Image: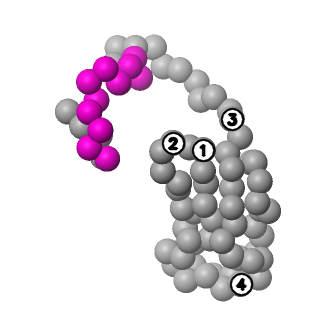
């Protein structure tokens, strides 16, 4: 069995076991990099930011379309 990135799930740990007790989310800071400026128009699907430190890949924050009314500065969030 493999995950969506074709990494094997054997030995994945207790989070994969449906009988394991639920654990709460751990709050930790993420590194955010804005890719647009406030006040700019962004078409639907436009990458407006990037989140790193969430795993082996950076995640893109995508726009639903419209004017970017506010965006965080680069740094830990």
- Please tell me whether residue 6 belongs to the stretch shown in magenta: yes
Left or right of 56 on screen, residue 19: left
**In the image shown, does 53 or 24 lie closer to the viewer?**
53
- Which circle, 4 or 1, is nearer the viewer? 1
Badge 1 crowding class, 10 Å Cα cut-off, few under 14, some 14 to 19, many 20 or more, is some
Which residue is under mark 3?
28
Left or right of 46 on screen, residue 66: right
**Residue 53: mark:** 1
Which residue is under mark 4?
40
**Residue 26: mark:** none
Q: Residue at x 66, y 85 (%)?
A: 41
Tell me which segment is drawn in magenta.
Answer: 5-15
Residue 18 in view (yes/no): no
Q: Residue at x 63, y 28 (%)?
A: 26
Which element is circle 1 on?
loop
Real-space CA distance between mark 4 and mark 1, rounded to the nearest whole angstrom: 27 Å
């Amino acid at each position: 069995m493999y995950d969506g990135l074709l990494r094997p799930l054997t030995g994945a740990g207790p989070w994969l076991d449906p009988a394991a007790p639920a654990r709460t989310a751990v709050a930790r800071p993420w590194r955010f990099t804005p890719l647009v400026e406030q006040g700019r128009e962004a078409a639907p699907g436009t990458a407006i930011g990037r989140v790193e430190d969430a795993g082996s890949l950076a995640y893109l924050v995508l726009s639903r379309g419209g004017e970017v009314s506010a965006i965080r500065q680069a740094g830990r969030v």
